[in-house]
Amino acid sequence: MNVVLITIISLGALGTLSAIILYFVAQKFKVFEDPRIDQVEEVLPAANCGGCGFPGCRAFAEALVKADDISNLNCPVGGADTMSAAAGILGKEVAAAAPMVAVVRCNGTCDNRPKTSKYDGASSCTIASSLYGGETGCSYGCLGLGECVDACNFNAMYMDEKTGLPVIIEDNCVSCGACVTACPKNIIELRKKGPKSRRIYVSCVNKDKGAPAKKACSAACIGCGKCVKTCPFEAITLENNLAYIDYEKCKLCRKCVDVCPTNAITELNFPPKKPKVETAEAAE
């Protein structure tokens, strides 16, 4: 009986001593976590889309708390309201970021870019892109297999069966960038939404010279440079036979749209232009 009692007392004492040691060890190596991280995480949208550049909202909240300046950090899903709420918790200031939206920089529809072959492999843009250039003469354009649509978690995209191209649903797009990352052809870009959702951009990524590009797609940029010469704001550059419009410099004057011989420049959400009325002197 004494042996059993001694054993119980010994084990109890050993357990108590171990608990005390573990407590002090835990206190010694305890990692302090700022309680503001939980507060900031609560105001984030919990989309965990990675659009902020961090692996989930928790990581983004930690980055916001640790950063001295949060002006370069942004939650594309939550937008200005979310960032203002987070800044209020942290007692920091943040400038309102211009809303962004995804655009598809390819106008190679079935009419503009006729098929020259038929792909019969896995329904994956990444796999198809690694195997060959595509079903048309343009090896730069959209493959039409919808990997970008599958990557979107916000129902902001769908594949247009008539054109064979993805379509962005602007009201649903949160500019998380998932579709940009998913596209192996790099034809999707995040651009400023623009005033009244008006945007102008070159819907082509073909870097071939003019004649081959035009042969592959009737709506391809042929690198003629007319848009560059016409732009009064120096917003357009020409590199590798391809024009690009800088949305930071573009003033949406639409002069480039008028001079493009292949209609490779897309203008969205603009009112129709008024027809020019010839004066009597011009008629003479």
Image: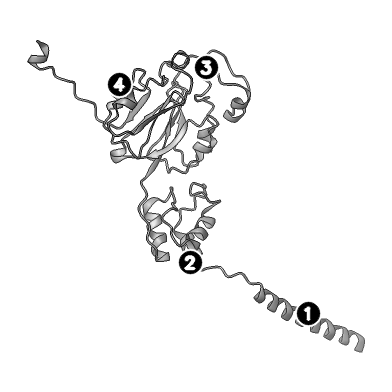
The residue type indicated by label 4 comes to Val
Q: Which residue is mark 1?
A: 15
Sequence-wise, the earlier of marks 2 and 1 is: 1
Secondary structure of the residue carrying numbered label 1: helix
Q: Which residue is mark 3?
A: 136
Q: Which residue is mark 4?
A: 259
Q: CA distance from mark 1 to mark 3?
A: 74 Å
Vertical arrangement, residue 104 with respect to residue 87, above or below:
above
Q: CA distance from mark 3 to mark 2?
A: 54 Å
148 or 34: nearer the eye?
34
Q: Residue at x 24, y 26 (%)?
A: 272
Mark in front: 2 vs 1: 2
Secondary structure of the residue carrying numbered label 4: helix
Whether residue 1 is visible here, answered yes or no, is no
Mark in front: 3 vs 4: 4
Residue positioned most to the bottom: 2
Q: Position of residue 13 (x, y in %)?
A: 80, 84
Q: Position of residue 6 (x, y in %)?
A: 88, 87
The residue type indicated by label 2 comes to Arg
Q: Residue at x 30, y 32 (%)?
A: 269
Q: Check residue 256 in the rendering and tell me which mark sits there, or answer none.
A: none
Count how many numbered circles sit on residues in the image.
Answer: 4
Q: Which residue is mark 2?
A: 36
Sequence-wise, the earlier of marks 4 and 2 is: 2
Sequence-wise, the earlier of marks 1 and 3 is: 1
The residue type indicated by label 1 comes to Gly
